[in-house]
Amino acid sequence: MAAGLDAPVAEDTRELANYLAAAFGPTTLALIHYGSHAHGSKPGPGSAHDFFVIVDQYAEAFRSLHLTANTQVSPATATTLAFVLPPNVLRIIAPLPDGPMQAKCNVLTLRDLRRLCSPRAWDDFTQGRLFQQVQIAWSRDPESQVAVRDALICARLNTQWWGRPFLPPTFTVEEYFERLLETSFSAEIRPEGNDRVAQLVAAQRKIIVPAYEAVLDHFVATRILLRDGKIYRLASPPTPGERMAIRAYFARSKARATARWSKHIALYDDWLTYIVEKIERRTGQEIELTEREKRWPLIFLWPRAIEFVRTRPQRKTPV
């Protein structure tokens, strides 16, 4: 069930992780590398490396980061916002010897990581990213490595809780993972088109299929699933109460994900450029903002944002 979590990262990723660990200071427990660079699903040339930075204390982490990376947001503001719709998401440019590298950092305490990878999660934002192929790129010590790895295994096991109402009558390991991706994607307003899920499945297949075969076999052993060769099915269908609870969870998750945009604007340096570049990279559409939209995006960008939400090419799912 831990397949891929301890896999070595690329040299440039390792250097970036080392820089980030030092920047966040002694409170840093571990860095989890996720996203397109982690599983090789066609990252763009300008795309950031994605990390979850796991720390002991928010205040100490943001004070250290402000001193080492000269971030624009004050440590006090960042610490306060860390308790509102966690995690905080920050853009950090690391001045490495071979040239600057860009990192998108989601900052969580170990306590919050454990909660957000469990059925007690407030929303799908964290586990929706961490149930996929990820790597522990850096850890402070063996105890930290084990603690974070256990939380990530919990995220994989927890997929049964939120995924079961949307599973087909029978499924393979790969079909299980594909349905998880479709379900999780529908919990946020995302720029990806209909082919993105297939790309992610193909990119992660080598690591994620063995991992989830172990997960599903665990569910067979605990009589949650039944297995016939390579085909699985639920031992009992979800109850109406379970379906209602999970649909409410995803409705809350989508509301929280949308509310989180205002927090990203407050914390993420050059957030407008990031959003435009990501939409262009995922949709293939070139976006030209007017000078007025660039100067006052929170006032004049709303018509364009509403049109994107209305016409986005996101796959529809049962959520």
Image (cartoon, helix red, strand yellow):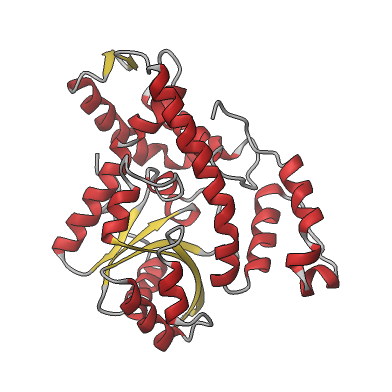
Residue drawn where x is 65% and y is 47% of the image:
191
Residue drawn where x is 74% and y is 53% of the image:
305
The answer to whether residue 255 is left or right of residue 240 is right
The answer to whether residue 47 is left or right of residue 138 is right
Give residue 263's quadrant in the image. Answer: bottom right
Give residue 76's quadrant in the image. Answer: bottom left
In the rendered view, would you say 61 is above or below 237?
below
Instruction: Tell me residue 29's x, y (percent).
Output: 25, 67
Instruction: Tell me residue 182's x, y (percent).
Output: 52, 33
Figure quadrant of the N terminus:
top left
Residue drawn where x is 43% and y is 84% of the image:
66
In the rendered view, would you say 98 is above or below 285?
below
User: Extreme left residue here?
Assistant: 143
Give residue 159's quadrant in the image. Answer: top left
* Residue 174 in view, yes or no: no
Viewer-nearest residue: 306 or 2? 306
Instruction: Tell me residue 288's x, y (percent).
Output: 82, 63
Viewer-nearest residue: 117 or 194? 117
Residue drawn where x is 78% and y is 66% of the image:
299
Figure quadrant of the C terminus:
top right
Viewer-nearest residue: 147 or 36? 147
* Residue 316 in view, yes or no: yes
Instruction: Tell me residue 256's x, y (percent).
Output: 52, 50
